[in-house]
Image (tube, coloured by chain):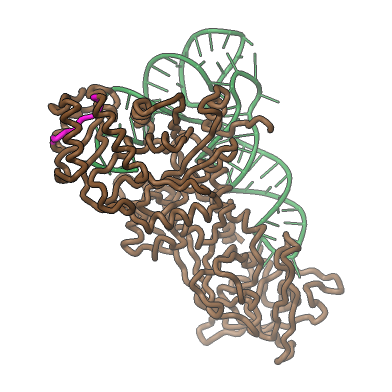
Chain colours: A brown, B green
Amino acid sequence: MDPIVPKNFIQQQIVEDLAAGKNDMRVHTRFPPEPNGYLHIGHAKSICLNFGTASLFGGITNLRFDDTNPTKEETEYVDSIMEDVRWLGFDWEDRLYYASDYFDKLYDFAVDLINRGKAYVDFQSQEVISEQRGTPTRPGAESPYRNTTPKENLLIFEDMKTGKYNEGACVLRAKIDMSSPNMHLRDPLMYRILKQPHHRTGDKWCIYPMYDYAHGQSDYWEGITHSICTLEFEVHRPLYDWFVEELKDSDYRPRQIEFSRLNITSMVMSKRKLLQLVKEGYVKDWDDPRMPTICGLRRRGYTPESIRNFADMVGITKVDGVTDVALLEYCIREDLNKKAQRLMCVTDPLKIVITNYPEELVEEVDAINNPEDESMGRRKVPFSRVIYIEREDFMEEPASKFFRLAPGREVRLRYAYFIKCNEVIKDEDGNIVELHCTYDPDTKGGNAPDGRKVKATLHWVASSGAIACEVRLYDRLFTDPDPDGHKDKDFLEFLNPDSLKVLDKCFIEPSVKGAAPLSNFQFERLGYFNVDPDTTVEKPVFNRTVSLKDNSKK
RNA sequence: UGCCCGAUAGUAUAAUGGUAGUACAUCAGACUCUGACUCUGAGUGUCUAGGUUCGAAUCCUGGUCGGGUAACCA
């Protein structure tokens, strides 16, 4: 095998660990979500990082639910998380774990620490403990319970476990250093009492381990070699290492490595805010196509490949940055451009009557499904006397750089005929209601035998067979590049009022019939659209996935 | 205010003491049965002041700016 050239600092670290012969040369990572909400694009970065990095080194990755706080966690979230990770294309095989699997072992280890005088039960109130912890500049004070004997602690801890004490009555703390400059080392909490049923262990426990106590031990028991987490856990690392040192029974050590979480311009990523958007009805649900959730992106038309590619392109560093949403949009455009079937759809129809075309005749013209992929085949599209084009493809008084249809001008209807506009029909208010055109029967297929050229080609839908439908255009949810970054303003002030536009007079060619739910199409020149799962063929609804470049300066 | 972390084009990243590259974005041009897609080209960058060195984005020191951290959340 070729030597691996590290692409980021984490891979670099792994290369060094491997070169030093650490942990029997294993690479084993884990993705450890708390099942308290839906996964979003930020989690996707972490999923790709954990699974991708391990796989690069021939290692494996666990899925582990970090479910140590029963007040926030639900089975519904567990299910959605598994679905989303699978959809992204990753497989944890038989390595599905829960932090709650380790409640017994964690308890035993706590007893061990108590026995060795390294943990104690504290009966002080939360306020007192907090006050005693000191400040960053002032050392903390030791708790009066700090020197309770192991023997006593053992009995008390047992009572804690069996429910003798009420919530908040006492906690188990690690005995480390109340004057450490790192606040996390000032006798951190290991257990608290929560008389709440747990989504997996039910009423078995009323004491639950804290993150810092549970996470490193879970890593250790699973044989994790590289425990990748986000930057805010950087100052927790000494504590992570402290617990692992106390637990160790061999040379093996998991290593915590931190990277910066994903931020994207004009998106909000915090679970609290996403929940607010759903709860207060700014979006329809967690899977609203405007949401940054995995399920939202899926409905929007994002493919797993495009998201994985995006995760690869944003890179891994410790820099707090904001990635331009344009990169994400580029990734899906690039992927769909290769895969999406082309279809003609008119979103703002202008009626055209081809006056020299026979009344009852319906011809079929031959269209290419994907110009970049012959294997996607061809289709027949009906053509008739009455057709629709985009209203913006006609100008009664064409601007200088406008090449499309205008009075007296000839253009091509894609795959069909050249047509020439002869007459503009208006209502009493002067609004254009239809155009009368003539077609050249010799140009069938789109080319003139005499070799004359036209400057523009238009997409169109024939009234015969056309499916009248509604098209929903989903745009960015926020107008500001950084809706979170304004200290004095709420992020809701930057909601984009035009993030959802409903176009209800659209026509689409009949070829869309039978399309699978959530299949992507490219509408000629209009962009990429995704068939919504809850639509019927008779009335399809599309999610616009990405906008094309701004053509307004035409 | 202590401790920890970070700083390379507009944005995100690479270069691990030896020519500062790449992608997105932007602009210009070419092509085209859509002005899309594609292709070609262009501009712009090492936070700052010192030091070490033949040579510093890289190593050292000071400064500046930004982020994290003082939950019985994770």
Residues drawn in magenta: A117-124
Q: Vertical placement of A413 versus A284: above or below?
A: below
Q: Quadrant of the C terminus of chain A?
A: bottom right
Residue furthest to the bottom in view is: A360
Quadrant of the drawing holding the N terminus of chain A: top right
Front residue of this view, candidates B38 and A93: A93
Answer with the quarter of the image where residue A260 lies: top left
Question: Is A118 within the magenta?
Answer: yes
Horizontal placement of A363 versus A13: left or right? right
Q: Nearer the viewer, residue A534 or A479?
A: A534
Using the image, determine if residue A189 lies above or below residue B34. Answer: above
Q: Position of residue A249 (x, y in %)?
A: 40, 26
x and y percentages locating residue A68 in the rendered image: 32, 45
Q: Residue at x 67, y 84 (%)?
A: A436
Q: Is residue A235 visible?
A: no
Whole-percent x and y of residue A99? 37, 44
Q: Position of residue A43 (x, y in %)?
A: 45, 47
Classify residue A418 as left or right of residue A171: right
Q: Quadrant of residue A393?
A: bottom right
Q: Is residue A391 visible?
A: yes
Residue that appears at 73% across and 89% down? A361
* Residue at 39%, 65% in the rendered image: A284
In the image, is residue A119 above or below residue A378? above
Residue situated in front as seen by the camera: B70 or A396: B70
In the picture provided, is A455 more to the left or to the right than A203?
A: right
Horizontal side of A498 relative to B29 (left or right) equals left
Name the image quarter holding residue A176: top left
Identified at 33% across, 52% down, the residue is A200
Q: Is residue A148 magenta?
A: no
